[in-house]
Image: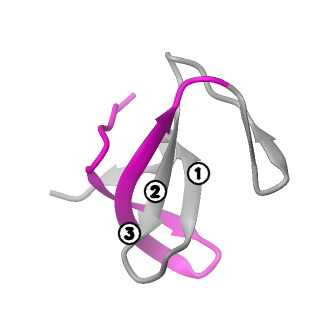
Amino acid sequence: MATFAIGDHVSWNSEAGRVSGRIVRIREADFAYKGYTHHATPDDPQYEIKSDKTDHVAAHKGAALTLIP
């Protein structure tokens, strides 16, 4: 599984299509976000990504992300 760092430019699929943004935080423990409990561990972290086009921040596991060179 790929690992990412803060500042990496990534893309992912959303309901609105392909979205891109920069990683702003890495979560390695369970956390509440937008009314849901997201599960994360040091071996399977979740990444908070700020969209390039809006101020929206999304949380995704690394398997959902693609690094943009």
Q: Does the magenta stretch include residue 13?
A: yes
Which callout, 1 or 3, points at the residue further toward the start of the chain? 3
| Residue displayed at 45% across by 64% down | 50
Q: Where, quadrant-wise, is the N terminus in this rendering?
A: top left
In the image, is 43 to the left or to the right of 24? right
Among all residues in the image, which is located at the extreme left?
Answer: 69
Q: Mark 3 points at which residue?
A: 20
Q: Which amino acid does label 3 sit on?
A: Ser
x and y percent of residue 62 in the render?
46, 39
Among all residues in the image, which is located at the extreme right?
Answer: 35
Q: Name the residue under label 2.
A: 49
Q: How far apart are marks 2 and 3 (CA)?
A: 8 Å
Residue 2 vs 52, above or below: the answer is above
x and y percent of residue 14 in the render?
58, 70
x and y percent of residue 29 in the render?
63, 23
Mark 2 against mark 3, which lies toward the viewer? 2
Q: Do the residues labelled 1 and 2 touch (CB within 8 Å)?
A: yes
Q: Name the residue under label 1.
A: 59
Q: Residues within 10 Å of mark 3 (few under 14, many from 20)?
A: many
| Near-viewer residue (63 or 26) | 26
Q: Are marks 2 and 3 in contact (CB under 8 Å)?
A: no
In the image, is 24 to the left or to the right of 42? left
Q: Does the magenta stretch include residue 46?
A: no
Q: Give the range drawn in magenta.
A: 1-29
| Residue displayed at 36% across by 75% down | 52
Q: What residue type is labelled 2?
A: Ile
| Near-viewer residue (55 or 53) | 55
